[in-house]
Amino acid sequence: MLLIVTKIYDPTADYVCERMKKRNILFVRINLDEVVASGTLEIDPVKILWSINTSKTIIHSHDISAIWQRRVPVIKAESGNSLVDEYISKEWRLAWEWWLNLQPDHIILDPEWRLKRAANKFLQLQTATHLGLRVPETLVTSDPDAFKRFFSKHNTIVAKLLGGFGKVSQPEQRFWTIYTNKLTEEDLRRAMSLRKAPVIFQEGIDKEFEIRTTLVGNQFFSCRINSKKSVRTQTDWRRYDFHNVPHSVIELPVEISEKLLQMARVLGIHFASFDLAVTPEGEYVLFEMNPNSQWVWIENLTSMPITDALIDVLQNKVFCSY
């Protein structure tokens, strides 16, 4: 039986579960926040035996053939005492992370520790460069003077967050974040604000179009995103303008796909997306890799069978191949 580990509110997990039902695949979904609220957890870490009572069913380690860690939620305790709440939240978070990291490699698709390591943007840029992929010239700094020097060196630069800070507002479940932004001379006047927190700055890349390619096991599903078609999406296509920005299937050059696959292997990841741009001269530039990423909107726009490929990887344990 396949196990999906996630949280109560997860439309992507809902989508995958529906697809599994249509394919008559035996699976179980655990919402970790639901277990915290009304279930129980029991683990023998030496024997790697565990059972989870979701209050609806009891799942044992010997019932499971493969695990997909979709999401580990932030547990919000509400005891009325802030110190107690912090304690409870941290203990549950560690319990879930350590439980997932305890699973043997042949059971779990990309455990928590690998996802965290692979999400390191510094490590991604270093690894990509060593493999011969072009990446934007990058500066990470909290020094206003270093920022000004970098700004003066390039015609255009963009600013990005290190951790992709985002927050879901309640109860409407809207997601708020800060996207990649192109900087202007006006931003130089606010350089001192860098002392609050470091920022990633990169040279601006002249894009003919962009590519979001999703790696599932050893297979790539690549989508061309014509982000220049809309002013809204020219700097960051995540500002979505589906009516004006065409999405279409594209094949990556073999040389690029081989290097991306090698990068995933170096970082120990089997399921991820890569964001790239193609310049007017036809050069491929890698921006970042997103382990355990989102893909459903790409599948809906292009009809590429990404979800079925993910299910096949879990069923056949393709992640054991390297």
Image: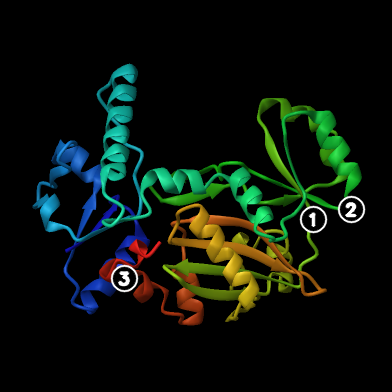
Q: 245 or 171, which lies in front?
A: 245
- Mark 1 Cα within 10 Å, few/some/many (few <14, many 20+)? some
- Residues under numbered marks 1 and 2 in contact, where contact means CB atoms less than 8 Å apart: yes
Left or right relative to 22: residue 297 = right
Name the secondary structure under disc 3. helix
Residue 76 at x, y percent in the picture? 32, 34
Count the marks: 3
Q: Nearer the viewer, mark 3 or mark 1?
A: 3
The structure residue drawn at horizontal position 82% and vertical position 33%, both measured from the top left corner, is 146
- Mark 2 Cα within 10 Å, few/some/many (few <14, many 20+)? few
The structure residue drawn at horizontal position 28% and vertical position 74%, both measured from the top left corner, is 19
Residue 30 at x, y percent in the picture? 22, 52
Q: Cα distance, mark 2 to mark 3?
A: 45 Å
Q: Which residue bears the numbered disc 2?
A: 155
Q: Which residue bears the numbered disc 1?
A: 204
The mark that comes first in sequence, 1 or 2, is 2
The mark that comes first in sequence, 2 or 3, is 2
Whether residue 170 is visible: no
